[in-house]
Amino acid sequence: MSETINAGTTPTSSIPGLVAGTYALDTAHTEIGFTVRHLMTKVRGTFQEYAGEIVVKDSLEESTATVTVELASVHTRSEQRDGHLRSGDFFDAENSPKMTFASTAFKPEGDDYILAGELTIKNVTKPVELAVEFLGVDQNAYGQTIIGFEASTSISRKDWGIDFNVPLEGGKLLIGDKVDIHLDVQAALQA
């Protein structure tokens, strides 16, 4: 890990090399994805268009994160399924084009962290907590300070009004309610 500190920034006390400032998500090195059960398998998907920033404060507990995702950018390797996910049965991307997350608290938990915040989908806002594993601080090929982390949570899609399903024999349903969300993030310190 790099211990370089950029001019005009101050180091935080608990993570070596991490400096206060605004970090923008690097979309070339970040993935926002999900997994949901479909029959006897799991469907994995990602979102291709999003923007976000992490504002690191001198005290990590005061740091914030915001992300905006374009729901029409959903990608599951099936054009037909992606079209259905964009429809009113699921995301209703035409009328509610964005999913947003805004943090409300950041706290250490053992060697990792919990990031609490509000997730908004289809104009419904609910609290969520993400488990965060900080992967480190370094510099990219352009000399920018970068941070990396993974975050994950599970939600009930019904809580956000996404309750389309197809009943099957024996009382089973085609699509699971639980959605696992995972983020693999690299973000670069902005000048």
Image (cartoon, rainbow, N blue to C red):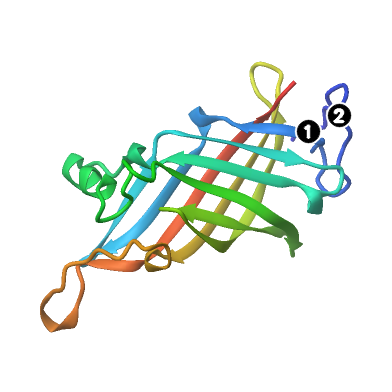
- Return the residue nearer the eye: 155 or 14: 155
Dot 1 falls on a residue whose secondary structure is strand
Instruction: Give the residue at the far top of this rendering.
Output: 142
Q: Looking at the image, is 1 positioned above or below residue 89?
A: above
The tag earlier along the polypeptide, 1 or 2, is 2
* Crowd around label 1: few <14 · some 14–19 · many ≥20 (10 Å): many
Q: Looking at the image, is 189 positioned above or below residue 101?
A: above
Dot 2 falls on a residue whose secondary structure is loop
Q: Amino acid at mark 1?
A: Gly
Residue tagged by mark 2?
Answer: 9
Give the number of callouts. Answer: 2
Residue 100 is left or right of residue 66, and the answer is left
Q: Looking at the image, is 47 positioned above or below residue 171?
A: above
**Distance of label 1 from label 2 (alpha carbons):** 7 Å
Q: Which quarter of the figure is the C terminus placed in? A: top right
Residue under the point 37% across and 67% down = 158
Report if the CB atoms under discs 1 and 2 are less than 8 Å apart.
Answer: yes
Measured from the top left, where is residue 178 in percent x and y? 38, 67
Q: Amino acid at mark 2?
A: Thr
Residue tagged by mark 1?
Answer: 21
Quarter of the image holding residue 66?
top right
Residue under the point 69% across and 56% down = 104
Residue 107 is left or right of residue 179, and the answer is right
- Return the residue nearer the eye: 15 or 33: 33
Q: Which quarter of the figure is the N terminus placed in? A: top right
Measured from the top left, where is residue 133 in percent x and y? 64, 53
